[in-house]
Amino acid sequence: MLVLVVWVSSHRCTVCAVKLFSVEPGLSDRVGKIVDAVRVSVNSSSENLQYPVLFVVRQQKGVLSWQVPLIFRGLYQRTYNYQEVSRTLCPSEPTPEAGHSDQIIFVDVASMAPFDIAYELLVTRLNNFQLEFPQDVDSVIVKVVSDVVYPCSVVSIQDIVSISWVLSFFHSPVQKKDFPGEQFFVVFVIKPEDYACGGSVPSSIHGKLAAFSLESIYVQAMFFSFLSFLSFYLGSVVVAFNYPTFFSSSNGGEQLSSLERGPQDDSDTDSSVEEESDFDTMPEIDSDKNVIRTKVSCHCSHGCDAGQWTKLDQYQNIITIAVFYALPVVQLVITYQTVVNVTGNQDICYYNFLCAHPLGVLSAFNNILSNVGHVLLGFLFLLIVLRRDILHRRAMEMKDIYILDYGIPKHFGLFYAMGIALMMEGVLSACYHVCPNYSNFQFDTSFMYMIAGLCMLKLYQTRHPDINASAYSAYASFAVVICLAVLGVVFGKNDMWFWDIFSMIHVLASLALSTHIYYMGRFKIDLGIFRRAVMVLYTDCIQQCSRPMYMDRMVLLIVGNLVNWSFAIFGLVYRPRDFASYILGIFICNLLLYLAFYIIMKLRSSEKLLPIPLFCIMATAVMWVAALYFFFQNLSSWEETPAESREKNRPCILLGFFDDHDVWHFLSAAALFFSFLVLLTLDDDLDTVRRDKIPVF
């Protein structure tokens, strides 16, 4: 039975008491549910702040007190007076399953007012305040829905053994293993102003309604990632390994004529002298890239050799970089996750709490699991490249004429680096999603810079096979970009000086690289490049106006510079807070522009697209469009306060386990994989074309 003694009276300096007796567990069948918590509500019509009514609750192991009117102080000396106050009282310890437990709660009421003050005290029983895990459920999601935005509420999940009343965190989802008694309390604290939850928006609304619901988690959907990518994996292996990459037997007449015309190196050298008579043959020609970059036709002799010497450097260096970059990242995100688990403060990490499925110490395992596609497809791409590399080496050992004299020389170092970069993108994206926030977003984009840069370098190397960029210089450039990204995260929010310097570097780098590309490397990138460029412009455009020597390249570079200058102006004007995505946008736009230029020039040169690369191009376009659709479904935002970010949270959309961002991970992994296949197979139609017939652009 439940005995409630309620006093409604007027007092000067008196003390009243309310006694609450809990029943024995054996009596629960007759009186209903055993009382686990009660709510004490008091109100007073008096607004005299000098003589408030004081209420003190004395329990077995604690004391709780408050006054009416209750005053909350906000920013700028704002005050909020409340005439009605409620407190929820819990038993000092869980009621044992056997035996009886009687607890007495005293409520003392006092006032120092020299006149009568009317007040009302009401004690009621609560329903659904204490929640118990079902037998077959190991974890649940606590979902809080509010009808109004302001003021904010602070929600916490607490063990029934040690409940706290001053709260600053919200814990969700909840796992049974974290609560020895397999029960927990859900506690709400209403704040008068939003600043208490990390915002700064005041509000005059003094009421807030919240609906509470509990959802079970079914973890079988975790296997979907592996099963779906395994089928994709196997299908890709079948297609890739049955595609006739190398033509071992072609037109016999072509092969005979190739054998009868004598040593290919001599004819290539003569052609080179006719086209570029200002270069002489010298012992250092293998290291002088300018000799071959200026030729209209591609040559094999130097390009293939250079590729064999530097192929290992390309992916061995990226492995070294990946290890040394990833280890501190892993350590940092583990520290973040540990802090979240120890303190329970999930305002540190910006999860989609409506679809965050924990596993072990991880709070959002679904966001991590969805990155498995990058690792699996990156490894698959490495296998495809390895097969091509093995077949190429066998053909070289057999001195196959179609390997020695036909097609674009094969260099696989950059392809290996691209596959490893795709795998590392999955690893670092998973690390970022351990605790997504503003400080570690750069981890999610760092290897995307490398992927975009490697793809552009590979596109350029395809028609300039002598170019196999030094791994040290290439990755040093990426290091500079990542360094700028870190500086942008630190200083890019409001510091105008940073944007001035970055925009200047961006524009100058675009001009220098454009000059280097237009003259195919004859203008070396050094401190004198701008002086030489001005002299050429004066000679060719002012002193004697002449048509550009390389019109196609000129059009590409003009469009590219307009795009990059537009990015620079946008950064100066708007100063986007997400600096890492801003830099990534620059890389992606330049890559897409260069790829479009390459395909257009390929078609203009009367070359054709074979079915496999054409399919890969179409699949890439479809995958990227679908992936970007899900990418722009903002489920959280570390650019806003944690409370405002939760307003963007959405339920799971795939198998009740994955959200929109997880689908983005799946589709973007497939899109990157198909993009790599485009670069790998785009020029397979040239495998039966003599190298001195392949145009350079």
Image (cartoon, rainbow, N blue to C red):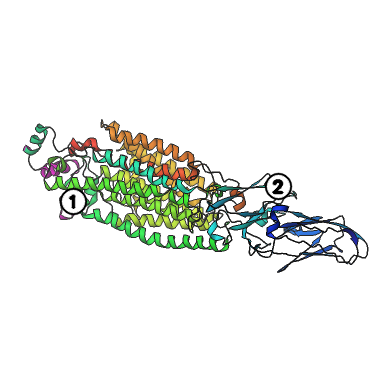
Neighbour tally class for label 1: few under 14, some 14-19, many 20 plus, Cα within 10 Å: some
Q: Which amino acid lies under the numbered mark 1 shown in the image of this protein?
A: Asp
Split into 4 quadrants, where in the image is the C terminus? top left
Looking at the rendered structure, the kind of residue marked 2 is Leu
User: Residue 150 vs residue 403: left or right?
Assistant: right
Residues drawn in magenta: 260-284
Q: Earlier in the sequence, mark 2 or mark 1?
A: 2
Residue under label 2: 209
Residue 533 in sight: no
Is residue 460 positioned above or below 442 on the image? above
Q: Which residue is mark 1?
A: 305
Q: Residue furthest bottom?
A: 61
Left or right of 511 in this view: 172: right
Judge whether 92 appears above or below 78 on screen: below
In three-dimensional space, the C-alpha distance between marks 2 and 1, rounded to whole angstroms, equals 73 Å
Q: Is residue 283 magenta?
A: yes
Magenta stretch: helix, strand or loop mostly: helix
Residue 444 image point, x, y percent: 44, 52
* Residue 257 shown in magenta: no
Is 113 left or right of 341, judged from the image as shown? right
Give how far across and how far down residue 671 sits, in percent. Answer: 38, 41
Residue 83 visible within the image: yes
